[in-house]
Amino acid sequence: MDAISAKGDRLTLTLGHYAHQILHKLYRRIVKFEVEVYRDTDPEPLHQMRVGMRRLRTALHVFQGVAHLPTGADDKAIRKFGKTLGTLRDLDVLSDRLRHDYRPALFPVEQRELDKSLKKLAKQRKTALKRVRKTLRGKHYKHFKRSFQAWLDAPIYGTVAGLSLRQAWPDVVQPITQQVLLHPAWMIDTEVSPEGDRVAKPETTGQVSHASALLLHDLRKCIKQQRYQMEFFIDLYDHPDQLEGWKTLQDCLGQLQDGAVIRDFLRKTLGRHWDKLVPNLVQRLTVDEQAARQEWRSLQPHYLDWQVRQSLRQVSKERSGYQLSGALNGMPDGVPDGVQNEVPGGVQNEVPGGVSNGVPDGISNGVSDGASEPEHLQAPSDESSTLHPSSL
């Protein structure tokens, strides 16, 4: 039985206690993969560490006003580390897409042209890997770990941290949900219905405009945050199956983004007439983009429906003696019973270093307590498959 199971009705936990548990779990997931990311023998640890950074940032947004993190461990610091990891991860995804999804179907002459781009991509990856390793060795990342561990040992909370989950958890998830539901991307290709609602237009043709593509990409990022926060409270939602719907929509928007990024990369590496060098690749990209656009057009009306949107807002469960379990399965002990209002005079050392096989001191080899990871906190292998223009 984990530490929280012994406390009885988990809805009587305070927001502060719950935030501590979630942040502790997410922090452990990040440092768990440091060594394997540094060694660079398998792309999966990089994927997991990057997603861990994303989830940690989302948790800080969800629990802002509840958990007061020090400057070195705040959203700004985590965003910088995530961007460095993301650049390397995006290059891996781009290479995999081009090599395995597109190259085999091309004629030999087109494969040779594509190989020129892949060679340049490999050089970019070497540079990105150096930056990742420099970051993991660097003082800012070590300061982040010291600061975060210090907060975990003696957390500082806001006043509202004393509210119970029963009282306040629907309120802490509303800002991100509202951000998704009120995103301007839903207005793309819409019209006013006879009832006065905004609805999707009948089927349209043509490419997605640049402005619309940017909006859809931003919507996808918001949907990721919605998914992550749902996972933090998954057992409390009236309709946990909504999580799968958000995942489907996220993947659809990711396919739209991938096509634009691949086109931009090939233009930069093969020149402005790249489409004449690899015409079959252009055709395949177009087919994939049209399929993704068609899927978006089929999903958009669902999320514009007023009844669906109302169900997405009604999140809380009213269950007598309801037990929260999934999100905290395997959580560590050590949560303080009271809300502390100051940090200790000293700061704990960072996770022990001295890792062998060429990994510098200060880079953790994972968690020490051997606690297992809940499945819902593990990133699926395809979660970060979408490419980002700023990374390439």
Image (cartoon, rainbow, N blue to C red):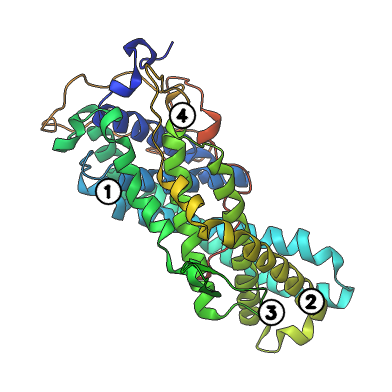
Q: What label does residue 74 carry, if any?
A: 1
Mark 3 vs 1, N-terminal side: 1
Amino acid type indicated by mark 4: Asp
Q: CA distance from mark 3 to mark 2?
A: 17 Å
Camera-nearest label, 4 or 1 = 4
Q: CA distance from mark 4 to mark 2?
A: 44 Å
Mark 4 vs 1, N-terminal side: 1
Q: Position of residue 11 (x, y in %)?
A: 33, 23
- Residue sitting at x 46%, y 22%: 329
**Front residue of 319 and 248:** 319
Q: Report crowding for label 1: few under 14, some 14 to 19, many 20 or more residues within 10 A (C-alpha).
A: some
Q: What label does residue 235 carry, if any?
A: 4
Q: Is residue 87 left or right of residue 338?
A: right
Q: Position of residue 232 (x, y in %)?
A: 42, 36
Task: Determine which residue is flagged by label 3.
Answer: 205
From what the image shows, is residue 13 above or below residue 177? above
**Front residue of 298 and 29:** 298
Q: CA distance from mark 4 to mark 1?
A: 27 Å
Amino acid type indicated by mark 2: Gln
Q: Position of residue 358 (x, y in %)?
A: 51, 40
Which element carries disc 2, helix, strand or loop?
A: helix
Q: Is residue 271 left or right of residue 304?
A: right
Q: Report crowding for label 4: few under 14, some 14 to 19, many 20 or more residues within 10 A (C-alpha).
A: some
**Quadrant in which residue 124 is drawn:** bottom right
Task: Determine which residue is flagged by label 2.
Answer: 283
Mark 3 vs 2, N-terminal side: 3
Which element carries disc 1, helix, strand or loop?
A: loop
Residue 97 in view: yes
Which element carries disc 3, helix, strand or loop?
A: loop
Amino acid type indicated by mark 1: Asp
**Front residue of 314 and 172:** 314
Camera-nearest label, 3 or 2 = 3
